[in-house]
Amino acid sequence: MLGRMSEAVERERLDVDILFVGAGAATLASVIRLADLCKAQNLEMPAVLVIEKAPEVGGHQLSGAMMDPRGLAELMPDFVAQGFPYHYQCTSDFTWIMTNKRVITSPVTPPPFMNHGNYAISVSDVVKWMATKAEERGIEIYPGFAASKPLFDGNRVIGVQVQDRGVDKDGKPKPNFEAGPEIHAKCVIFAEGTRGNCTKQLIEKLHLEGSNPQAYETGIKEIWRIKPENHVPGRVVHTMGWPQDPTTFGGGWIYDLKDNCVSIGFVSGLDYDNPYTDPHDLMQRWKTHPRMKKLLEGGECIRYGAKTMPVGGYFSFPKLYADGALLIGDSAGTCNGERLKGVHLAIKSGMLAAEALIEAIKKDDFTAPTLSLYERLFNESWLAKEHYKARNFHGSFKYVSKMPRWLGWLRQLPWIINGQALAMITGGRGLVKQVHTHPDHTHMKKLSELSPKEQKKREKVAYDNKYTFDKVTAVALAGSRHEVDQPHHLHIADTNVCATKCAVEYGNPCESFCPAAVYEMMPDDANPGRKRMVIHHENCVHCKTCDVADPYAIITWTTPEGGDGPDYTNM
Ligand SMILES: Cc1cc2nc3c(=O)[nH]c(=O)nc-3n(C[C@H](O)[C@H](O)[C@H](O)COP(=O)(O)OP(=O)(O)OC[C@H]3O[C@@H](n4cnc5c(N)ncnc54)[C@H](O)[C@@H]3O)c2cc1C
Ligand code: SF4
């Protein structure tokens, strides 16, 4: 494996009091709250720095997004008057149960899908707007700074190292080489969103894992400009059923946006069992449904993107603090998979972290005992209560794959009964206190275990370039850009496994689960009859699916040069 520059490189060192890694909703809520609390309590504002890997704030944000305003209303009660950018407030909710030809509109909207009064937003726009509010309060934000690893003194977090720039594909410095600085801080707040690369290293080193492993879904999102007569401001639709098979968790959404646009998307749980599962293909297939075609007919797909979201929920929360560190937002797993909502929870976790930080600032003590206040505030808050009510929702889905195949869709009954019906009556419990789960990738079956019907999932939908697009065309709509002459930021521990064991056992599922056609098995001229792995890293849309779904868990997503990645403006 080719790495970046060696440890021997001389690095500049920057010192701040508090460093936030990632400029998402969680961080921006936190720094706004911190500044407001300092002002209200006449405290000197500490030196705060926010770093972000995107070339500009909001550039790597992707979400549905139907936002519950609860968190923002606490942070800024007059948020609408302050220019909060939104499209519409939800006025009508629908739940569609889909078969391959029909749609049955559910007579009742399941409570988690009720959205009346919630806001259709672009999370990228909201984050940009929040950044202006933070900057008005004197907060410094450095975009284009990708943190490659956390820095430790023993078990105490002391900062992060920023990724180098100007390294060629063989790991050698180019004329434009710039060593990434070390940024040292009294406290580092990890707010990298889903499956953060530094957060992952931190959790592993300090054993901060929750009692269940984190679980993920991959969401594919497209924005379409549709015919005005098909556009319904305030409409929110969630779909269930087709084209998902009974053992794969997931469903779709339709949210109308301004300018005759519509946000549509399809999410797939990564605890699926069929190695041919392809989240991009499922999204494309979903659009071939007669009802979806009617919506999109005469329209144009203008944006594409993909991202994972953590959905393990309550039992998957890691320990939220360590000496010199806090975890907030999706890095702490705050997204609520039952409601497909995380923005309000990311905001709330950031605010709670700020409240704990104020006490640490007053004592000038950022050790774990002082920072543990954050976890206490978190557990006492409405954030934890919202999650507690959904604590066995995702975990109960594991029963589906244990049911005999011949039951078809009835296999979902144990999940519906335990994770939804009984959970609703028992305040989230269901039949057992905690449904214990296993990491997503361990659910994947080997090819030899698939039935002929399951083998058919290998066949992809036919791309017509009208409603459906192949991955390479889709990636162009994600605007992804990476310097080609740099080391791959996708590290495969042993590519021999891809060519031998994985090819036979799982049929190289990375070619299916990656929504950006990054992984390709090509004929290996040096070993006739074998294939070799080729990584098109420049396509990567930073969704992190590969880091989660690889059945051998040997793919690690690392940061490319700061500023590289998708362009998710308005997503
Ligand atoms: C497909 C999809 C649909 C969703 N739909 C909804 C919805 O309808 N409603 C809703 O409320 N929520 C929804 N969510 C969830 C919601 O978007 C997230 O929970 C929320 O945005 C998390 O905010 P965050 O600040 O924790 O993380 P993010 O918004 O992901 O921000 C993290 C930031 O950190 C940066 N970063 C990451 N690593 C590094 C690094 N090493 N160095 C520097 N910067 C780094 C990233 O570029 C990013 O800008 C959805 C999520 C997905 C994926
Ligand atoms: S390489 Fe990994 S992170 Fe990049 S787009 Fe593919 S699955 Fe997502």
Image (cartoon, helix red, strand yellow):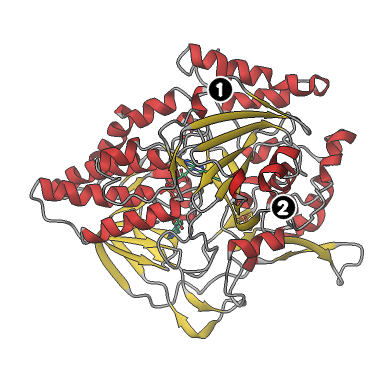
Q: Tell me how far mark 1 sits from mark 2, CA to CA.
A: 29 Å
Q: Nearer the viewer, residue 463 or 411?
A: 463
**Amino acid type of disc 1?**
Val
Marks 1 & 2, CB-CB < 8 Å contact: no
Looking at numbered disc 2 in the image, what kind of residue is underneath it?
A: Cys
N-terminal of the pair, mark 1 or mark 2, is 1
Q: Is residue 285 above or below residue 449?
A: below
Query: Does the beta carbon at disc 2 come under 8 Å from ligand 2?
Result: yes
Q: At numbered mark 2, what does the secondary structure look like: helix, strand or loop?
A: helix
Residue 442 at least partly seen: yes
Closer to us: 436 or 464: 464
Residue that numbered label 2 is attached to: 510
Residue 430 visible in the current orientation: no
Q: Residue furthest bottom?
A: 175
The quarter in which the N terminus is drawn is: bottom right
Label at residue 435: 1
Estimate the x, y position of residue 401 in percent, counting from the top left. 72, 27
| Image side of residue 107 versus residue 67, left or right | right
Left or right of 436, for residue 364: left
- Residue 281 in percent (x, y) is at 73, 48
Assess disc 1: are there few (<14), some (14-19) or many (≥20) residues with their C-alpha within 10 Å of its C-alpha.
many
Who's the residue at 44% across and 55% down the image?
124
Q: Nearer the viewer, residue 331 or 497?
A: 331
Question: How far across and down, in percent of the image, does residue 198 sit?
Answer: 45, 55
In this rendering, is residue 516 above or below 319?
below
Q: How many marks?
A: 2
